[in-house]
Image: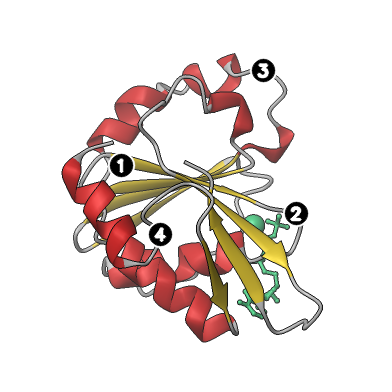
Amino acid sequence: MDRTTTQLLADLDLPTPGRTLLLPGVEAQQWLGARLAELPPGTLLFLEGELGSGKTTLTQGLVRALGFSGLVSSPTYALMHRYPAVQGAVLHIDAYRVRHPQELYEMDLEVLVQQARLSVMEWGQLYYPDFPDAPILRLQHQDDPDVRLLERVR
Ligand SMILES: Nc1ncnc2c1ncn2[C@@H]1O[C@H](COP(=O)(O)OP(=O)(O)OP(=O)(O)O)[C@@H](O)[C@H]1O
Ligand SMILES: [Mg+2]
């Protein structure tokens, strides 16, 4: 992980794996996404967490902050959405249906990630070993349905 990424995570009060942050509502979730839009070009960000934990909501904040005002929706069926943001292309991948890593490598995943301003992958556990420098954030539901807990996993 490069210095800029490490510093940004520290600025967000996520200096080490295991650190958590409460996100009280959709606006907070999107605000965090907007801050993560400051990650350096070519970064792949992994988001994990059960269905409905807010991965796509966070991504909406990130994509908007980079200058794309259109619809940011779940790419579950398309596998990958590519948003032409002002600051560069943003890839939004949902690997929920992927059974073998090869499926995305056939789409030249590594090259696409390198060329993108930023890439976000939901359900990307299969790809963690191949992108050892990519930060991993986990979202969890809380008893209060309007709150999510974010944990830095890597
Ligand atoms: N911090 C939050 N507080 C309250 N509600 C939230 C928060 N973040 C997201 N939500 C709401 O939770 C719902 C599900 O969010 P979202 O689609 O982003 O989840 P997801 O993790 O991407 O789900 P999936 O795994 O199905 O793709 C949405 O209705 C969204 O508005
Ligand atoms: Mg989603």
- Spatial distance from mark 3 to mark 2, Cα to Cα? 20 Å
Q: Is residue 68 visible?
A: no
Q: Earlier in the sequence, mark 3 or mark 1?
A: 1
Q: Residue at x 68, y 28 (%)?
A: 98
> Mark 1 — residue?
43
Query: Would you say the residues marked 1 and 2 are in contact, meaning their CB atoms lie under 8 Å apart?
Result: no
Secondary element type, mark 2: loop
The kind of secondary structure element at disc 3 is: loop
* Residue designated by label 4: 14
Camera-nearest label, 3 or 4: 4
The circle drawn on residue 50 is: 2
Q: Earlier in the sequence, mark 4 or mark 1?
A: 4
Q: Residues within 10 Å of mark 3 (few under 14, many from 20)?
A: few
Up-down: is 10 above or below 77?
below
The residue sitting at 24% across, 60% down in the picture is: 38
Q: For the residues labelled 4 and 1, say whether their Cβ atoms are less than 8 Å apart.
A: no
Badge 3 is on which residue? 100
Amino acid carrying label 4: it is: Leu
Q: CA distance from mark 3 to mark 1?
A: 22 Å
Q: Which mark is residue 32?
A: none
Relative to 56, is 75 above or below?
above
Q: How far is mark 4 from mark 2, CA to CA? A: 21 Å
**Which is closer to the viewer, label 3 or label 1?**
1
**What is the basis of the colouring in this image?**
secondary structure
Which amino acid, by three-letter code, is at mark 2? Glu
